[in-house]
Amino acid sequence: MRSDRQQVPRGASAVDTDTGENQKPQSDEAHSAFTPPLGIPMPPPPEDEHPTSEFAVPGGLTAEAPVEPEGSAFVPPPGVKTPQHNQTTGGFPAITPANGFPVVRLTKDAPWQDRMRTMLRMPVSERPTPERVEQQDETGPAVPRVLDLTLRIAELLLAGGEGAEDVEAAMLGVAHAYGLDRCEPTVTFTLLSVSYQPSLVDDPVTASRTVRRRGTDYTRLSAVFRLVDDITSQEEFTLEEAYRRLAEIRRNRHPYPGWALTVAGGGLAGAASMLVGGDWPVFFAAAIGAMFGDRLAWLASGRGLPEFYQFVAAAMPPAAMGVALSLMNSGLQASAVITGGLFALIPGRALVAGVQDGLTGYYITAAARLLEVGYLIVGIVCGVLTVLYGGVQLDAKLNPEAALRHVERPVIQILAAMLLALTFCILLQQERHTVLFATLNGGVAWVVYGALADTADIPPVAATTVAAGLVGLFGQLLSRYRYASALPYVTAAIGPLLPGSATYFGLLALAQGNLDRGIPFLTQAAALALAIAIGVNLGGEAARLFLKTPGATAAPSDRRAAKRTRGF
């Protein structure tokens, strides 16, 4: 059987019968193992080119319905819209924005205290990103310099008697103004610290500063408030300009000289003696005793004695003046003279700040402030009791029953209350344009107290709380209108409400060995002091809660409340 294909020897060329051309045979390397030989047709392509997976469902079987994913507590239910709801598609955005969803919108119309207090009462992860204009220099100022400026500003505020929450709000505002978003300030009685962490994976930068010296200068305090307001509100406020303003604030002298402070202390004691029923001779006697006490305290301060001994020295001359008038049988009210001297020494500013810190949750700072108040009051007690004990040994006619005698002289007492507030403003080194408002606020406080205690027969503690609440309300209104601190408008105005007479008669009863009468008087003095502090704080909180800032567009209900644990 002969094959149809003619064999061709090696090395010879094959001739194609159709074309007549010679073709070389292909080598064995040109053939693939998967290629069929010549003359055998190609197999048909498979219906499914993809191999079958072992996880595929065999034919004839129905796949199970997909399990519905478990819902998340953070996903809003269908049909519920949020402020971030996509108005175009009707759904929610596919991704979360880089800066997160801001919970609160902080407008520039509100004072920086309210804006920063809102952020301060929120965790770091929930704080909205502040609205800032993009700077051309993306690097920004150095982090250590910003933290140093923040601590220097906070030191002046805390040393001036500002509350811990407002100090932390100022620190947070300055840090945010210069781009430090993840910032945590901490304020205690003597230590300030601030920590900045760029992200969760970066190392934090922490700086601290110790407040070693405190002073009473509300002019400097107001200047620092204006500086913080400019830093937080102006778009281009450089760090160098902030340091320059801060250096000018530190270099400024007190607005009133030393002799004016001494005269103001005497006027305060004289006005306080008029409030408790004294006449003009009593006014001058109390003024002279207070001025002697002020000069003696300055002498003790110049010798480097602690503040406790300064209060002991300042309390002795007014008490000695009252004992001397009693020994001379001059017919003047010695109790009014001593009470007037105590009015000038009671640390009402520190007391209000301490109670305010306690009400806002800063318990360590509040405890330290109240402990300081306790030490200063003990110093006053030591000075007064030393003199009163000597007067009792000399048979001075000091009668604690005089506290039961009440004299109603509305016009004289209102004028005396305004004079007391005026002299208190000078002692606090306030700016001159704030003195008038604080003086009127003190007159209003005494009018309200007199109307409630004398006319309506309301207990003194309740009447003091209402009067102090109005003082705090008016002071907060004035501060919000001027974008300044409320302390210059409040501290001097509560002067007429201070418990000077109850403190004196309690100390006198203790000096005479009458504990049954002395302890109720001292308890009443403590209750009145707490009523003043709580009333001032309540008035300020009411102003922030219900009243809108003049010229602001945001509603007052947008203010974020503090998250508290209710004690557990």
Image: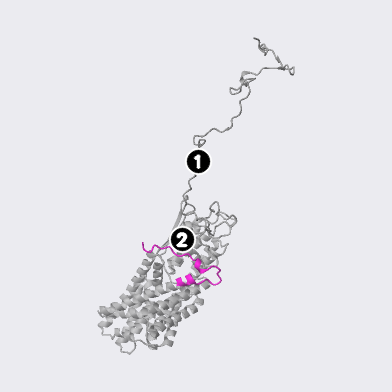
Relative to residue 235, is residue 395 depicted above or below? below
What sort of colour scheme is used for the picture? one colour
Q: Let me know if residue 148 appears in the view.
A: yes
Q: CA distance from mark 2 to mark 1?
A: 50 Å
Say what amino acid the circle numbered 2 marks: Met
Q: Which mark is residue 122?
A: 2
- Which of the image's four quarters has the N terminus? top right
* Disc on res. 80: none
Magenta segment: 540-568
Q: Nearer the viewer, residue 25 or 389?
A: 25
Kindly state the secondary structure of the residue where label 2 is placed.
loop
Q: Is residue 544 magenta?
A: yes
Is residue 383 visible in the rendered image? The answer is: no
Q: Was residue 65 drawn as part of the magenta stretch in this picture?
A: no
Taking the spot 31% from the left edge, 79% from the top edge, the residue there is 521
Residue 108 position in % (x across, y down):
55, 65
Q: Is residue 236 above or below residue 66?
A: below
Residue type at mark 1: give it.
Ala
Dot 1 alpha-carbon crowd within 10 angstroms: few under 14, some 14 to 19, many 20 or more: few
Q: Residue furthest right?
A: 20
Q: Main secondary structure of the magenta part?
A: loop
For mark 1, what is the residue? Answer: 63
Which quadrant holds the C terminus? bottom left
- Counting from the top left corner in percent of width and height, residue 522 is at 31, 77
Q: Secondary structure at mark 1?
A: loop
Of 175 and 5, nearer the camera is 5
Q: Is residue 559 shown above or below 495?
A: above
